[in-house]
Amino acid sequence: MPDYKLGLDYALEQDRNDSLKHYRSLFHIPKDIQGNDLIYMTGNSLGLQPKQTKAYIDQELTDWAQLGVEGHTEAKNPWLRYHEFLTENMSKIVGAKPIEVVVMNTLTANLHFMMVSFYRPTKTRYKILIESDAFPSDKYAVESQLRHHGYDPKDGLILWQPRDHEELLRYEDLEDILKAQGNEIALILIGGVNYYTGQYFDLKRITELGHAFGCHVGFDCAHGAGNVQLNLHDSGADFAVWCTYKYLNSGPGSLAGCFVHERHAHRKDLVRFTGWWSHNKQTRFNMRQEFDQLPGAEGWQMSNPPILSMAAIKASLDIFNEAGMDKLTEKSKKLTGYFEFLLKQLGEATIRIITPHNPNERGCQLSIQVRNADKSLHEKLSHSGVVSDWREPDVIRCAPVPLYNTFEEVFMLVEKLKHILHA
């Protein structure tokens, strides 16, 4: 644990000694009406735009203008295989093998496509287990899958819940659920990092537990990809999905990522929805061939890649590849730990951090619960120049992202919060 100190001088010293400090200059930082940088702490909702994104997209617009349809093969980055330019860097970020990763579709669409293959209910094994405070889209998706297969979500949905007066989930409670109902559960789907509390789950432990009871196991890593070391391959999970517009800085509503473990790479017995982009690349354009499934995660693709969105992803992944997830997570733990230290030094009885204290059980997000607060507190913080995130009923989420946030910003955020609480 670093020896954190109070005072602005300490924060400025940490920024001077930060080996990743130059990456901040690679991003557009939102400004207030006076032209001052805002303290942007919502990379967990929408990451900032890399300055090179425009050039990456412009390259494709230029090739489209000059080459038309020939850009599929003659562009600087030929469009036919553009998704392949993202695979290696993305696989490094999520801790997977290239054959296990593909960028395609959007997050909830990918979740449904994965459930086509890995939620195969039977009369005796049909239930789905999720965390009780899963991101709403996940809950809606699994409920719709249950209804699609003819099951009532009130019966088919099992919730892993925190204990009374607690926010964080306990693995012992998950074990108890599986001991009692494991032979009825077809799928376990957990958010790799919970959107509300910031709790980072032990993916390998959950996977091994689920597999021991015969369940398929998948993860929604929307709040984990680019934030924590997911190590998806080593986790043994059957599948995972994630978006790219949060920590991966690809722009609003951008494409998502998908992981399918390599043990499923050559399985042709898995039921799936298919399209021509999951067909053998060598015969794809013969048009009249019988379906010949691609191996690996690519075999779940449906359509040709949307190039402009992928160009924005490529711009960000190139930065991640240069910085490296090891260095980013190292800085993240130090920066978030400093944030936690300063909040605790406030000595405010009204403030409670509901995110795990253990750096290995969280990413860069801290969820700050303020007793008796309402959204006006968040609005005052916003007016002071802090872009944070409010979640009902009483939580402010802040994410000091290691690529572009600084120790000085964390210091100033806490000073502003202290001023507001004492006003």
Image (cartoon, rainbow, N blue to C red):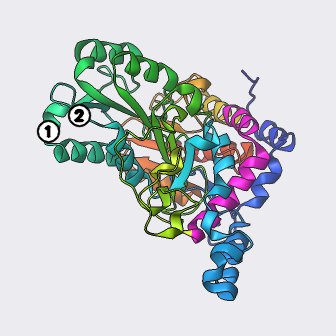
Q: Residue at x 64, y 47 (%)?
A: 90
**Residue 70 % position (x, y):** 65, 81
Q: Quadrant of residue 229?
A: top right
Q: Is residue 322 magenta?
A: yes
Q: Is residue 47 left or right of residue 22?
A: left
Q: Residue at x 80, y 36 (%)?
A: 10
Return the mark for residue 151.
Answer: 1
Q: Which residue is mark 2?
A: 121
Residue found farthest to the bottom: 66
Residue 97 drawn above or below residue 37:
above
**Residue 191 % position (x, y):** 43, 36
Q: Nearer the viewer, mark 1 or mark 2?
A: 2
> Which element is circle 1 on?
loop
**Main SS, magenta residues:** helix
**Residue 244 % position (x, y):** 55, 53
Instruction: Please name the amino acid that badge 1 sits on.
Output: Tyr
Instruction: Please name the amino acid that badge 2 sits on.
Output: Pro
Return the mark for residue 4.
Answer: none
Near-viewer residue (166 or 187) = 187
Near-viewer residue (337 or 120) = 120
Q: Which residues are magenta?
A: 307-333
Q: Quadrant of the N terminus?
A: top right
> Which element is circle 2 on?
loop
Q: Quadrant of residue 13?
A: top right
